[in-house]
């Protein structure tokens, strides 16, 4: 008698414990799959939109302006070629947010020899222009705001002036 009642008690306890251990076990299977699929799709959309948002430059690209994107990864592109004596327009965009502790998302495009020193704020772009030198040559451009500044090899590039 005593033994039987003990085993009944155990059986009742263990089934109750099993139920409490599986949240949502009371929901129909199709509903659990639906909830899981919805969460997976939402996470996927968020991830894709973050990547696309990161790749798209801020502002509308201006026709005839060379597009230069500056981020913590460096300049893209980091090689520019222009013709001697021509009027050059460069649209400089910062791809970084103001959340960057190093420079607050600001970047610079500077060429000492040409007295160029342009700065652009976080997630914005601006069109600058200058007249290319009349003699061919190469000029280093750099950003001195972020990541160790001028000495950082990724925050540098080369402007080539051709004849
Ligand atoms: Cu920079």
Image (tube, grey):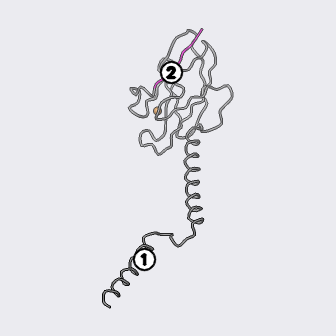
The answer to whether mark 2 is within 8 Å of ligand 1 is no
Label pair 1/2, CB-CB below 8 angstroms: no
Q: Which type of secondary structure does the marked residue at label 2 adopt?
A: loop
For the N terminus, give its image quadrant. Answer: bottom left
Decide whether residue 90 is among the magenta residues.
no
Residue hosting label 1: 15
The span picked out in magenta is 156-163
**In the image, what residue occupies the spot 57% across and 61% down?**
33
**In the image, what residue occupies the spot 39% across and 80% down?**
11
Q: Which residue is farthest right?
A: 63
Circle 1 packing at 10 Å, graded few (<14), some (14-19), many (20+), is few
Q: Which of 137 and 9 is in front in this view?
A: 9
Decide whether residue 160 is among the magenta residues.
yes
What's the CA distance linking mark 1 and mark 2? Answer: 80 Å
Place residue 18 in its image quadrant: bottom left
Q: Position of residue 155 (x, y in %)?
A: 45, 28
**Disc number at residue 110?**
none
For the C terminus, give its image quadrant. Answer: top right
Which is more N-terminal, label 2 or label 1? 1
**In the image, what residue occupies the spot 50% across and 14% down?**
138
Q: Is residue 7 above or below residue 130?
A: below
Residue hosting label 2: 115
């Amino acid at each position: 008698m005593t033994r039987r009642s003990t085993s009944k008690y155990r059986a009742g306890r263990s089934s109750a414990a099993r139920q409490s251990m599986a949240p949502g076990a009371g929901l129909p299977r199709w509903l659990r799959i639906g909830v899981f699929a919805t969460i997976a799709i939402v996470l996927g959309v968020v991830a894709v939109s973050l990547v696309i948002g990161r790749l798209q430059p801020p502002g509308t690209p201006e026709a005839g302006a060379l597009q230069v994107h500056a981020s913590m990864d460096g300049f893209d592109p980091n090689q520019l070629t222009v013709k001697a004596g021509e009027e050059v327009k460069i649209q400089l965009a910062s791809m970084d947010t103001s959340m960057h502790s190093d420079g607050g998302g600001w970047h610079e495009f500077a060429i000492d020899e040409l007295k160029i020193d342009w700065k652009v704020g976080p997630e914005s772009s601006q069109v600058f222009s200058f007249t290319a030198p009349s003699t061919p040559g190469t000029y280093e451009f750099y950003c001195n705001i972020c990541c160790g500044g001028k000495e950082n090899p990724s925050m540098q590039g080369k402007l080539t002036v051709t004849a």
